Image: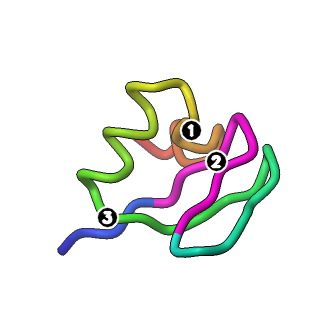
């Protein structure tokens, strides 16, 4: 499964671990889409520039 780097916009628990806003974590593509759709995460700015 494809992994995607996302930057959290809010505090979020993933895989039983709590992350603060601003943390960058690797999640699968479906999880990234779910997080982004709910304004919990975004693609980090440095990754958007590479596209």
**Residue for badge 1:** 41
In the displayed orientation, state which residue is furthest to the front: 16
The answer to whether residue 25 is magenta is no
* Residue at image coords 23%, 69%: 2
x and y percent of residue 15 in the render?
51, 74
State the SS at label 3.
strand
Instruction: Place residue 27 in its image quadrant.
Output: bottom left
Q: Is residue 43 above or below residue 3?
A: above
Could you tell me how far apart the alpha carbons at marks 3 and 2 are, in whole angstroms? 13 Å
Q: Are marks 2 and 1 in contact (CB under 8 Å)?
A: yes
Q: Are marks 3 and 1 in contact (CB under 8 Å)?
A: no
Question: Left or right: where does residue 27 sit relative to residue 30?
Answer: right
* Residue at image coords 38%, 48%: 32
* Residue at image coords 44%, 33%: 36
x and y percent of residue 16 in the render?
59, 74
State the SS at label 2.
strand
Q: Earlier in the sequence, mark 2 or mark 1?
A: 2
Q: Which mark is residue 28?
A: 3
* Residue at image coords 32%, 40%: 33
Q: Is residue 51 above or below residue 13?
A: above
Q: Which mark is residue 7?
A: 2
How many other residues sit within 10 Å of disc 1, few (<14), some (14-19) or many (≥20)?
Answer: many
Q: Is residue 34 above or below residue 37?
A: below
State the SS at label 1.
strand
In the displayed orientation, state which residue is furthest to the left: 1
Could you tell me how far apart the alpha carbons at marks 2 and 1 are, in whole angstroms? 5 Å
Q: What span is colored magenta in the figure?
A: 5-14
x and y percent of residue 47 in the render?
54, 48
């Amino acid at each position: 499964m494809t992994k995607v780097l996302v930057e959290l916009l809010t505090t979020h628990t993933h895989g039983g671990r709590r992350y603060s806003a601003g943390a960058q974590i690797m999640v699968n593509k479906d999880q990234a889409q779910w997080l982004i759709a709910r304004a919990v995460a975004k693609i980090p700015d440095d990754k958007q520039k590479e596209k």
